[in-house]
């Protein structure tokens, strides 16, 4: 039983409604785990006082939590796992690209309602350096809203309105690093020893060079290496991402205590899900790659256990774009199973879907998913096909080899396919962070452009256009049906193409991720009634699929996804079940029709009441001689009667 379940149980048994009494109870329930995690990171012999400081901090943080949110916390404890519901459908957006600022965003609530969106991830909105700032992921503060978005008052108005309208909000917590303009960094540069201890700062490059022996590079093209020399300080500082993003030193418990306060303050603004940015990097140890270390997991769980005591209605999303077997660990393992993050990006599924599009085969997807250990039952995925970042090719080499493919040649093929190095490929993406030393690279581009719409439109090739529309719908149909919250990247719902304007902006031109960070095209949205446009076709079909998801509780995540092999390497099938219902998701990644044998589907009981219905086409499926035909890029949601 997870700590969250314990809190739910105690709350239901006690019939107690005083938030403070329930806070004390949660603290008592979590304190031994908190203590254990704390002392595993900060040994008791030297850090007894820090632990006492933490115990004093928690009630203080609770006291300043707004009353409305305390009440909401208790309602959520009663309601259970709201984040696993079939009603959850998300969208990720940049405020300034969506509709100017926070007020503009609030005006667009009817748009979300029309599409069926009730969960929104707003990209960073806090103050950041002028010029390069990694899209706001270099933070100058954790709570001050940058002027371009409006004010803190606007943010609070927005979160209050979202609450009223039943919309959940996710905001980033850039937990691994601050910008070099953050007050702590500024003080460190001025020579303040206390704040120098908040970062990994070294007198000379001896230790940095030792670290470098094992550390990979995140941005090898634009920010090679993991350390930056700061002349004003005459010292080296660890900067794993960009040179202006300083890594926080969590071996110092003061950093943890300050960041916990920052986290709770974020939750106090009405944030429902906190996106723990780049959390795989939180703990550094010489001689290791300093990613996914056990101490990082203890630290995240420690944050979680404390936040759960103070603000149990707020949950955490792991942004760990790492190997599938490593992602799953962010849900917690062993004593912290289910006590780390409630949600994680399903980066594995995302990358495997793009592999299936390029190869037209699902074999690597089946093989890889078969190796992903089951997640704890109270945790859920964020399923997505595109986001503001690149697509990394994080497949396991040995699984590629088992298919008889050469891993490096296979990756090269994918880069060639998506990044315009093959004439016949419909995709118009770009290479990102290509590392000639290793041949590694990643892919950028919008979903529609990567799926062929841009090429189809420029060549006025109707069949290419139609095929790309089917692909866009199929890819979204998969993430809508897979257990978890589907997160649509703003613009994809109207098939937005690549945005090349970043090339003229000096602060963006070296980062091709801006290709897939377009302005929301309200002009196109105003013309959606013309249902012959590709944008209209995608929008209306997605809206329909979202509505179907919401009408069918079988889409709720009960940790029930089961993949079925069909014997046809172009087809993907998984089943979703609850106590009463079943649903088979079937789709075809090939550009020719494919057939699938159905005797095993009968055995699962889908034909018990005659031919079953496909919810997508809203008609009964036809099976000839025991074979089901699946058209190119068709998606079928077969409902068990
Ligand atoms: C996350 C963000 C990415 C950013 C990085 C560093 O991976 O998604 O955009 O560059 O963190 O903060």
Image (cartoon, rainbow, N blue to C red):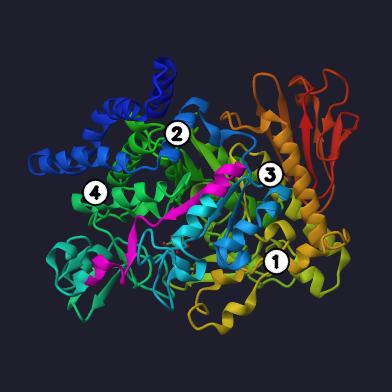
The numbered mark, 4 or 3, whose residue comes first in the sequence reads: 4
- Front position among marks 4 and 3: 4
The numbered mark, 1 or 4, whose residue comes first in the sequence reads: 4
- Front position among marks 2 and 4: 2
The residue at the point 52 percent across, 31 percent down is 81
Residue carrying label 1: 449
**Which quarter of the rendering shows the N terminus?**
top left
Q: Position of residue 82 (x, y in %)?
A: 54, 33
Residue carrying label 3: 478
Pick the residue in front: 44 or 65: 65
Disc 3 and disc 1: Cα gap in Å? Answer: 19 Å
The numbered mark, 2 or 3, whose residue comes first in the sequence reads: 2
Where 63 sits versus 288, above or below?
above
Pick the residue in front: 36 or 147: 147
Q: Dot 4: few (<14), some (14–19), or many (≥20) neighbours within 10 Å?
A: some
The numbered mark, 3 or 1, whose residue comes first in the sequence reads: 1
Disc 4 and disc 3: Cα gap in Å? Answer: 41 Å
- Front position among marks 2 and 3: 2
Find out whether the residues at labels 1 and 2 contact each other: C-beta distance under 8 Å.
no
Q: Is residue 183 magenta?
A: yes
Answer left or right for 604 relative to 225.
Answer: right
Q: Secondary structure at mark 1?
A: helix
Looking at the rendering, the stretch of residues picked out in magenta corresponds to: 160-186
Q: Secondary structure at mark 3?
A: helix
Q: Position of residue 623 (x, y in %)?
A: 89, 31
Residue carrying label 4: 257
The numbered mark, 1 or 2, whose residue comes first in the sequence reads: 2
Residue carrying label 2: 71
Q: Secondary structure at mark 2?
A: helix
Q: Secondary structure at mark 4?
A: helix
Disc 2 and disc 3: Cα gap in Å? Answer: 36 Å
Find out whether the residues at labels 2 and 4 contact each other: C-beta distance under 8 Å.
no
């Amino acid at each position: 039983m997870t700590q969250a379940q314990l809190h739910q149980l105690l709350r239901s048994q006690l019939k107690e409604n005083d938030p403070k009494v329930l806070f004390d109870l949660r603290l008592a329930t979590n304190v031994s785990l908190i203590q254990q995690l704390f002392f595993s990171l900060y040994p008791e012999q030297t850090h007894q006082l820090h632990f006492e400081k933490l115990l004093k901090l928690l009630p203080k943080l609770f006291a300043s939590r707004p009353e409305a949110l305390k009440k909401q916390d208790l309602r959520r404890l009663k309601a259970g796992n709201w984040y696993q519901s079939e009603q959850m459908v998300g969208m990720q957006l940049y405020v300034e690209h969506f509709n100017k600022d926070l007020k503009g965003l609030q005006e667009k609530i009817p748009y979300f309602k029309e599409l069926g969106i009730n969960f929104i991830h707003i990209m960073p909105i806090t103050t950041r350096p002028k010029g390069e700032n990694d899209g706001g992921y270099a933070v100058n503060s954790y709570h001050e809203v940058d002027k371009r978005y409006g004010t803190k008052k606007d943010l609070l108005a927005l979160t209050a309105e979202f609450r009223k309208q039943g919309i959940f909000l996710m905001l980033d917590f850039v937990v691994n690093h601050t910008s070099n303009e953050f007050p702590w960094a500024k003080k460190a540069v001025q020579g303040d020893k206390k704040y120098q201890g908040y970062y990994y700062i070294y007198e000379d490059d001896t230790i940095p060079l030792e670290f470098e022996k094992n550390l990979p590079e995140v941005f090898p093209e634009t920010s090679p290496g993991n350390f930056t020399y700061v002349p004003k300080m005459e010292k080296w500082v660890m900067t794993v991402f960009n040179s202006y993003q300083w890594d926080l030193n969590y071996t110092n418990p003061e950093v943890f205590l300050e960041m916990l306060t920052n986290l709770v303050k974020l939750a106090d603004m009405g944030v429902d899900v906190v996106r723990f940015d780049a959390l795989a990097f939180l703990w550094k140890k010489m001689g290791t790659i300093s990613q996914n270390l056990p101490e990082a997991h203890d630290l995240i769980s420690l944050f979680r256990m404390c936040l759960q005591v103070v603000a149990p209605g707020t949950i955490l999303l792991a942004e760990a774009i790492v190997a599938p077997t490593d992602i799953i660990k962010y849900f917690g393992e062993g004593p912290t199973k289910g006590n780390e993050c409630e949600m994680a990006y399903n980066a594995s599924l995302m990358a495997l879907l793009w592999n299936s599009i390029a190869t037209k085969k699902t074999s690597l997807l089946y093989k890889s998913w078969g190796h992903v250990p089951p997640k704890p039952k109270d945790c859920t995925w964020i399923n997505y096909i595109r986001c503001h970042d690149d697509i990394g090719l994080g497949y396991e080499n040995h699984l590629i080899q088992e298919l008889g493919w050469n891993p490096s040649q296979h990756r090269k093929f994918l880069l060639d396919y998506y990044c315009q190095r093959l004439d016949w490929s419909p995709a118009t993406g770009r290479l990102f962070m290509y590392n000639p030393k290793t041949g590694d690279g990643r892919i950028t581009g919008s979903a529609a452009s990567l799926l062929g719409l841009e090429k189809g439109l420029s060549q006025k090739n109707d069949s290419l256009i139609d095929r790309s529309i089917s692909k866009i719908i199929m890819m979204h149909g998969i993430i809508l049906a897979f257990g978890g919250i589907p997160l649509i990247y703003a613009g994809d719902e109207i098939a937005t193409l690549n945005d090349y304007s970043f090339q003229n902006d000096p602060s963006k031109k070296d980062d091709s991720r801006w290709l897939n960070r377009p302005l929301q095209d309200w002009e196109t949205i105003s013309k959606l009634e013309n249902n012959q446009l590709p944008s209209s076709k995608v929008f209306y079909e997605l809206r329909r699929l979202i509505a179907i998801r919401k009408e069918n509780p079988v889409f709720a995540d009960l940790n029930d996804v089961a993949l079925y092999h069909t014997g046809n390497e172009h087809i993907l099938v998984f089943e979703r079940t609850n106590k009463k219902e079943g649903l088979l998701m079937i789709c075809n990644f090939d550009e020719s029709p494919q057939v699938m044998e159905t005797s095993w589907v009968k055995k699962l009981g889908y034909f018990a009441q005659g031919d079953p219905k496909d919810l997508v086409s809203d008609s009964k499926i036809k099976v000839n001689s025991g074979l089901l035909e699946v058209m190119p890029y068709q998606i079928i949601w077969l409902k068990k009667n």
